[in-house]
Image: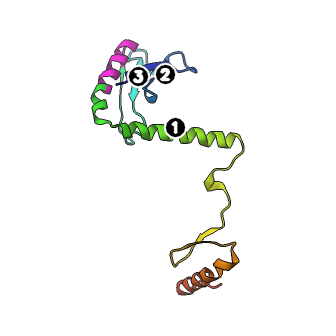
Amino acid sequence: MPELTRRRYPERQDCWHVYYDDVHVGTIALSTGVPVDVDQWGWILRFYPGTEVGEYRDGTAETFGLARADFDAAWKALLPTLTEADFQRWRDARDWTAKKYAMWESGELLPSQKPNSWMGCPCGERFDSHDPAGSHVHREHIYAAQAVDGIRR
């Protein structure tokens, strides 16, 4: 079974991302903007998708060591409730997001952004509206459905 690892976040020297194998499951960081007389370290345990929206645990502590111990205890309570499918959902989302940004960076369109001539007919079939041989039958279905709805052509 993998163990938790902590990786310093490159943009903040007082922030660590916590990973379970290759899944980012939380963060431990020095809190910003809090009064000096309250706990200075905060932690949050959550990863989405993987856990449900709003399903997280968090807390504060006086020192990094205490925050780390609290995080570890919360993780030990959460881990038995998780399945490999929960972690796979997170990996799938991570991989799709990386692919999406790579496509955008190269100027490529996402499949949903590409023009498409396929249409759905009221009869339930999908057809290519640019194909004159097949679209005339479905055109009549569409016109008939529009007439029932009171739409003029």
In this picture, is 36 found above or below 43?
A: above
Residue 50 horizontal side relative to residue 143, left or right: left
Magenta residues? 61-75
Q: Is residue 112 magenta?
A: no
Q: Dividing the picture into quarters, in which one does residue 43 lie?
A: top left
Q: Is residue 70 magenta?
A: yes
Q: Secondary structure at mark 1?
A: helix
Q: Marks 2/3: CA distance?
A: 9 Å
Amino acid type at image mark 2? Thr
C-alpha distance separating marks 1 and 2? 28 Å
> Left or right of 152: which side holds 123?
left
Query: Mark 1 belongs to which amino acid?
Result: Arg
Q: Amino acid at mark 3?
A: Gly
125 or 102: nearer the viewer: 125
Quadrant where the N terminus sits is top left
* Tag 3 residue: 42
- The image's mark for residue 60 is none
Regarding mark 2 in the picture, which secondary structure is present there?
loop
Does label 1 or label 2 sit earlier along the sequence?
2
Q: Position of residue 103 (x, y in %)?
A: 66, 43
Mark 3, Cα crowd under 10 Å, few <14 / some 14-19 / many 20+, is: many
Q: Which residue is drawn at the image coordinates 65% and 55% (left, top)?
A: 113
Q: Which residue is mark 2?
A: 32
